[in-house]
Amino acid sequence: MNRPHPPPVILRRPWRLIGLAAPCFAAGLGLSTALADHDPSAPPDASTCHLYDPVEPEVLLRRLSLDLNMRAPAIEEYEALAGQADVPEATVNALLQTEDFRQWARRFHMDLFWGNVDNVALNSGNVKLNTATLAGGDQVWKTASSGRRKKYRVEDTVCQDKPQTDIDKDYVLGEVPECEQVGDACLDGWVELVPYWHTAAQDTVKVCAFEAQTAAEGLDGTDLIPCNYRGANASAECGCGPDLRWCYTGNSEDTILTAIQEQLLLNVDQVTVGGAPYSSLITSTTGFTNGTLQFWKKHLAPMANLTKAYADWSDGDAPLASDPIATDTTWVVEQRGPQHSGILTENAYSLRFATNRARANRFRIIFEGQYFQPPSIEDASDCDPADPDITERCTCRQCHQVLEPLAASFSQTALAGSGLIDSLPEYEEDCIGSNNIACRRFYETKEDGAKPGWLRRLQYADDETPTHAAIKAHIEAGLPGLTDPVIASGTFARSMVIHLWTHFMGRPPILDPLDPNVETAQIDALSQQLRDDNDFRGIVRAIVSLDEYRRSR
Amino acid sequence: MRSVNSRHATPLGSLALALLLAGCGTTTTGAEDEGVASDTTTTGDDGATEETEEGPSITPSPPPTKSRVGKRMTVAQLRASMPVIAGPDDEGFPITWRANSGTNPTGTEMFASNKLGPALGDPDYIERVEEAAIPNALYVKLMDDMARQVCTNMAEADRKRVDTDARVLLRDTTLESIEPADVEANLRYLHLRFFGERPRAGEDPTIEALENLFFTAHDEAVTNDDQVAKTPVLEGWRVVCIAMMKSPEFHIY
């Protein structure tokens, strides 16, 4: 066996930069910035700073593949570069066309939009079903609300383990069931049906007969109330409706929330790989929907208590199918009304950022590259620290005089919800002093509040101060009043270029004009390109083609 | 059984944290390795050159930073990259870091959101809105776990593979060879596969170090029956694989 004599200690190849230290200092002094032709087979040249060397093609390929496709290259991809001085442009273009690139673009935008809404509560127990185990061991669906169970059966209990037809042989599915007195309770039996979360081909499930009621209206005391709208839980004659469509389940809620995130990402797909102008990300009235979301908007969202997410369908939304199928997960394009504006009015953005201030602040960070910072000095002159108008209150006003007008642009969408509220009456006199939940949700109810009886979003929309006037103007202009100037001024393009630069370079660009390495010119050029071409792939290609990206460090 | 790999792989892997943080001028050790550091100067953390007895003092400005900086792979990148780098097992299932991998080749990936993805920093955009892709102690520890499992499975898959051309870890050598030429050829191949770099022709310190590691692990297995893999040669390659998978070149791009 011919074996090499092992070295006395385990050496490892010096980290690339380590070997560069001395000549790089020279480069830093301006003494030598000579670029070496990089030949991996050549011995290291200690007199040359390799800081500005282009990396070897294999290294660049790994960099490109990880950055654009989120995976390391396969060995075959490396070996295809043998003898090549650079990664062919065709290879870069191919990386920009893959499914992995689409997934990367989604990830990049999720980093911006934080579009996970899994923690949003779409419903309350009043309109939710869960299962109980019957005496015979089978599962039966029943309302998750203790109050509603009592309303049906006097006591907080579930139905008996027998078919409802055993109690009432003339029972017709959906009717108010007769019940049997068992102690103080009056108990129904179960029925079998195909719920909305099953396809027609799937099995039926057992549901307590009270919960399976399908009447359109029921009595709440002496008032007739609709059974397909919030508040229906007040009537024992209201059930979960045909195929249980007026009640959520835990799984159906999860399915909806997952679809909401996918809806956002389909908008991203459209502008990153789908050929739509990139700026339409925040302006488009075209959206995406599927059966799950249509079913939610049509049947389930109107049932949710007003303490939960408000997502009612509005005239400004795309029309809904007459009978959407909850299990239909096929995505289709929908045309929304002019109130909508790209992802900014999509369910995910509105639900993830629950207040108009949060929506505006995130918009400002992402698309304007601006951050609010608390003032460093006390602000106490000519102001009231308890002023109910936050744009006038000491200290708060320093940010909120900017933020409130921007927030007003989003005010057509409900707080803690995604439903449009621009069709609500601007003024409701009955809401003054009212404890009604709808009043408290949308209107100023305090008699000593600012503009009692008015929609909260309009409370400060007047001409009393320049800020109020700006709020009023932003409400009237809607989101286009916010997005159009940002796009037209180039701010949108510049902000997105900076996000992309930071992502690919691993550091933000140097924009300090006093820094000798200032990179304003590069950012200007890239921003102009994105502004002119409005092409996401194109700007990504441009950034990864820069010398800065392809250098050794 | 005493673990060979822990003795040999750790010196390489333990450099990770320091090297990940290294920048131009922050370390002189490597420069000395390549013979570029002067006996007359020392380089401090701030990049300044200190005065010595033999020469005048110069205080250079920091090196230019107008380049991309190295980034650590994210959890998503690791998740997608491991099957590409590790290849399939002998039954065709992609090798990656899995729960109960020894008994379930399709078990849940450890990078998943219901496993160690969150611990490694994978954002969920609710509680964690950005991934701090830094080589902290937990990351280094878990990557050690990953490397040991994945490399063991890679070695075992190659041992079982009928089609020798389909080998992944031992592609440019054989299951029995300890010929230096074969070892070097396979190390060069692995260097490209794992790091995306072609070592320099001729002598290369990385190749030499890994060669030494291979033979040391192999010899330990022969002499002391200290091995996880089925044969001493496989054990050598398994240990090399672990060392490479733990190295900063693997994690930083």
Image (cartoon, helix red, strand yellow):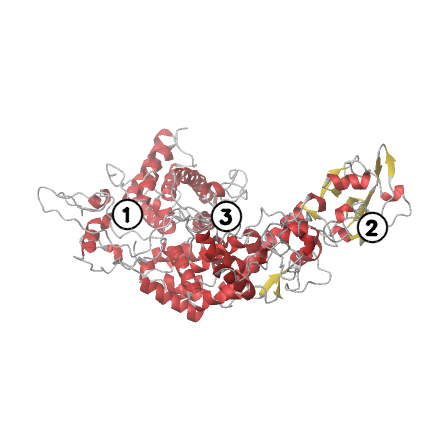
In the displayed structure image, the side of residue A523 where residue A138 appears, left or right: right
Residue for badge 2: A174
In the displayed structure image, the side of residue B91 where residue A233 appears, left or right: right
Return the residue nearer the eye: A71 or A436. Answer: A436
Residue for badge 3: B94
Q: Residue at x 45, y 47 (%)?
A: B75
The x, y position of residue A384, in whole percent, is 47, 48
Residue at mark 2: chain: A
Could you say whether the residue bearing mark 2 is in a helix, strand or loop? loop
Query: Does the CB distance between marks 1 and 2 fall below 8 Å?
Result: no
Using the rendered image, report if marks 3 and 1 lie on a common chain.
Answer: yes
Label 2 amino acid? Gly
Q: CA distance from mark 3 to mark 2?
A: 51 Å
Return the residue nearer the eye: A241 or A190. Answer: A241
The x, y position of residue A19, in whole percent, is 23, 48
Q: Is residue A307 visible?
A: yes
Instruction: Residue at the far bottom: name it.
Output: A532
Q: Is residue A485 above or below residue A216?
A: below
Using the rendered image, report if marks 3 and 2 lie on a common chain.
Answer: no
